[in-house]
Amino acid sequence: MNYEKFLTTITKKRKPNLIRHLTAASLKNPTALNFAGGMPNTAMFPFKEISVTYSDDMRKVLTGTDLFSALQYGPTAGYLPLQKKWREFQCKWHSLQYDNWDVCFTTGSMEGCSKILEMIIEKGEPLMLQSPTFVGIIGTVVPMQSDLIPIRMDDDGALPNDIVNACEERIKSNRPLPKLLYVNPTGANPVGTVYTNERKEKIYKLAQKYDFLILEDDPYYFLHFLDENPRSFLSMDTDGRVLRLDSFSKIISAGLRLGVVTGPQPLLEKLALHINCSTIHASALSQMLVYSLLSSWNDDDVQAHFTKIQKFYRDKRDIMLKAIEKHFTGIAEWSVPRGGMFVWLKITVLEDTYDLAMIKCMMQDLYILPGHCFYPKNDETCQYLRLAYSHIKSEVVEEAISKIAAIIRSTAANK
Ligand SMILES: Cc1ncc(COP(=O)(O)O)c(C=O)c1O
């Protein structure tokens, strides 16, 4: 594929940074004498060792070269052994179908998404977003003043007809086609949908027909409640048009701030040029901690970890749904989330949920999210609420949900 047409003027102007280039090359060569980089001397860092005990009691002590790697500048795309490990995982999980793909670690998947959007979308250019859309993406793209095209969703994922209509309309009126579609295939935030494989295949074919890229932001990939892992867009990609974002936030730690992009090398090279002049690279210590853990696990251990997480969140979801069923029947509509951390509720007895969430519930110490923030035009009325079941203590759920329902009923009664 020729990626030139997908890049913004700023991205095209980004040039390789010689220091980063030489640092990366020297790190691959144990005999190199590196006079090029401005690396501080680790002997002057006030650390002797860093030790960590993981929850299975495995203890890792970072000393010597490990300590050096954890405290020193490293390659832009990530700690080399972790890059290698992640490439192996991606082959295993997504069976990539083309050759010139690579990985690039980021400071969380949010950083990866916003940099990719800035790399591709100019002011005024059309951009398709599954709608409703994760609030972090709304916060990125609204100030970019792109031409936002909402692609509505049903229980199987984003609607192919909305994509067709948006593209055909533009062809008819001789306007540029969208360059990118943003999606969360697993446990979409905020709706909890898991795209079916058939839906993904249809969307991928449309991407080929109308020649757009797919930004597959999939932080809940391992947090689905299905019997089998879903197929990713990446696994269907024969052309190199999918940029896949994985995040460690939901499966290992959110505070380590680590995510990883997998996609076609030419685009990852451009992404790395942007990272070079912002974060430089994701935290080396975070990468070392994640690498130590992943390299101590065999395939069964990795799967056991994901199975444990899935069961934990499925149980939490079920406790929340039971309370919702009991207290919200007659005042709301919802679908059972098939992944992720949220229930998305339409409050049928109210025209708008903003004051309910931001005033009435807050006054009673109940924090719930009004649906407005998942739409670019957040000043329009919205009947939706998002409730997270991921971190509320199970024993308080029923009482809290009953209080929220009571506030909704009294608000509706006083309309
Ligand atoms: C869809 C989606 N993308 C990205 C993120 C941010 O992930 P990270 O912590 O890896 O930046 C979130 C977090 O809630 C999310 O829901």
Image: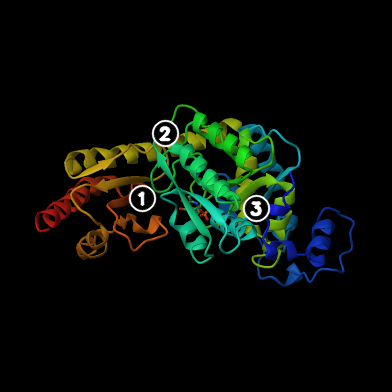
Alpha carbon distance from label 3 to label 1 = 27 Å
The amino acid marked with disc number 2 is Phe
Label number found at residue 225 = 2
Residue 233 position, x and y percent, is 58, 37
Q: Is residue 238 left or right of residue 147?
A: right
The quadrant of the picture occupied by the C terminus is: bottom left
Q: Residue furthest left?
A: 413
Question: Are there few (<14), some (14-19), or many (20+) residues within 10 Å of tag 3?
Answer: many
Residue 39 position, x and y percent, is 77, 69
- Residue pointed to by mark 3: 105
Q: Nearer the viewer, residue 241 or 368?
A: 241
The quadrant of the picture occupied by the N terminus is: top right
Closer to the chain start, of discs 3 and 1, is 3
Q: Is residue 262 left or right of residue 304?
A: right
Label number found at residue 391 = 1
Closer to the chain start, of discs 3 and 2, is 3
The amino acid marked with disc number 1 is His
The amino acid marked with disc number 3 is Phe
SS for dot 3 = strand
